[in-house]
Every structure is written in structure tokens, then in C-alpha cells.
């Protein structure tokens, strides 16, 4: 439960992010970026070394484009803090002309 609380606090502090639901091991969050969650998930891996799954993997077709599933079961206190720093460093993908 401490992990869940710590992860929830991180998202509460990040502008535009919103926790939709959280349990003891996973959280579903709404991201603030205009890009779809599958594209964002790829950027999270390449730019911040964070592996998260796009909401489209857990939703009916056409839904979940603004959602990400976060697993935090194996993160300790230091890992959760680093997770928060990396998420805060992510910037929006530029939108076309």
C-alpha cells in the first residue's frame, strides 16, 4: 500500500496526469499528451527507459488511447522516486505544422 500511495503522489504532482485506478501492483493513468498511448509507450522506453503498456492493450478497440498501465510491484522507495523524476522529464511530442 505504501508503493501505491507513493506512485499516486507522483502522478498527482505531474501536470495533466490523472490516476484512473490503482491497486497494490498496477495503476491505470490518463496521460496529458496529444499522442496515442502506443506511441507514448514507445517514447517512454526510448527516451526515459521506462516500460509501460499502452491503454489500448486493455481496452476495446478505439479506446484507451490516452491511458497507460504502470506496474510498480517491484519498485522500492528509491525506484519509485526515480520513476517520478523520469516521468517529469518527459516532454510532449511536437505536433505537426
Image: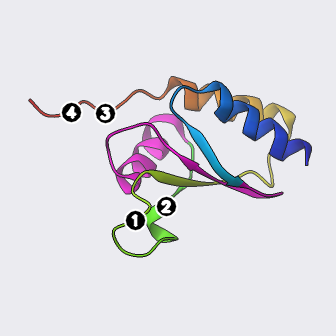
Q: Are marks 2 and 1 in contact (CB under 8 Å)?
A: yes
The segment highlighted magenta reads: 22-49
Tell me if mark 4 has few (under 14), some (14-19) or many (20+) residues whose alpha carbon lies within 10 angstroms of its own. Answer: few
Q: Which mark is residue 63?
A: 1
Q: Position of residue 29 (x, y in %)?
A: 58, 49
Q: Name the residue that disc number 3 marks.
A: 93
Q: Which mark is residue 31?
A: none
Q: Position of residue 97 (x, y in %)?
A: 8, 29
Q: Tell me which numbered mark, 3 or 2, is placed earlier along the sequence.
A: 2
Q: CA distance from mark 3 to mark 2?
A: 18 Å
Q: Which mark is residue 95?
A: 4
**Left or right of 80 in this view: 20:** left
Q: Are marks 4 and 2 in contact (CB under 8 Å)?
A: no
Tell me if mark 1 has few (under 14), some (14-19) or many (20+) residues whose alpha carbon lies within 10 angstroms of its own. Answer: few
Q: CA distance from mark 4 to mark 3?
A: 6 Å
Name the residue nearer the viewer: 70 or 34: 34
Q: Could you say which quadrant of the image residue 8 lies in?
A: top right
Tell me if mark 2 has few (under 14), some (14-19) or many (20+) residues whose alpha carbon lies within 10 angstroms of its own. Answer: many
Name the residue nearer the viewer: 76 or 13: 13
Tell me if mark 3 has few (under 14), some (14-19) or many (20+) residues whose alpha carbon lies within 10 angstroms of its own. Answer: few
Q: Are marks 4 and 3 in contact (CB under 8 Å)?
A: yes
Mark 3 secondary-structure assignment: loop
Amino acid at each position: 500500500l505504501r508503493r501505491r500511495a507513493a506512485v499516486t503522489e507522483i502522478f498527482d504532482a505531474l501536470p495533466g496526469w490523472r490516476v484512473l485506478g490503482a491497486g497494490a501492483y498496477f495503476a491505470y493513468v490518463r496521460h496529458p499528451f496529444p499522442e496515442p498511448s502506443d506511441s507514448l509507450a514507445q517514447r517512454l522506453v526510448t527516451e526515459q527507459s521506462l516500460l509501460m503498456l499502452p491503454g489500448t492493450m486493455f481496452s476495446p478497440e478505439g479506446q484507451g488511447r490516452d491511458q497507460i498501465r504502470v506496474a510498480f510491484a517491484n519498485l522500492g522507495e528509491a525506484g519509485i522516486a526515480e520513476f517520478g523524476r523520469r516521468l517529469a522529464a518527459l516532454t510532449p511530442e511536437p505536433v505537426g505544422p
